[in-house]
Amino acid sequence: PDAGQVIGQTLAQATQALAGFTVTTVGSDDPAGVVTAMSPAPGTRIAASSTVTLTVEGAAAPLPSVTPPAGAGAGPEAPIVREGGARHGLR
């Protein structure tokens, strides 16, 4: 069999696609992480149960939720910004 192309897939998807091979990882072992490289190269013919090493970048952490303080953006600074923009030809 050959080591199929799994670069760009999640680790979970890649592991499933490489069933029958022994999969090891370098970097993150997060199942949602993305495979960025593999060895042997995609499409290489290798013996069944051979080891395929995947380089995995961890999944991006969700961005924190930011809540502005009460009344933010509605204060006296808002008209000044608009007026300043108008003075400089901005609308």
Image (spheres, grey):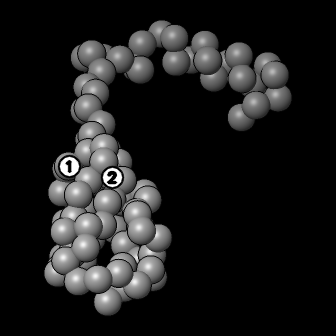
Going by the image, does 5 lie left or right of 14?
right
Amino acid at dot 2? Val
Say which element carries label 2: strand
The quarter of the rendered structure image containing the N terminus is bottom left
> What kind of residue is marked 1?
Asp
Earlier-in-chain disc, 2 versus 1: 1
Compared with residue 45, is residue 78 higher up or lower down, i.e. above or below?
above
Residue at the right extreme of this rendering = 89
Q: Position of residue 45 (x, y in %)?
A: 40, 84
Given contact means CB atoms under 8 Å apart, are the residues at marks 2 and 1 in contact? yes
Residue 43: % across, % down: 45, 82
| Circle 1 residue | 29
Q: Residue under label 2, please give it.
A: 56
Q: Report which quarter residue 8 is drawn in.
A: bottom left
Circle 2 packing at 10 Å, graded few (<14), some (14-19), many (20+), is: many
The residue depicted at 25 percent of the width and 32 percent of the height is 65
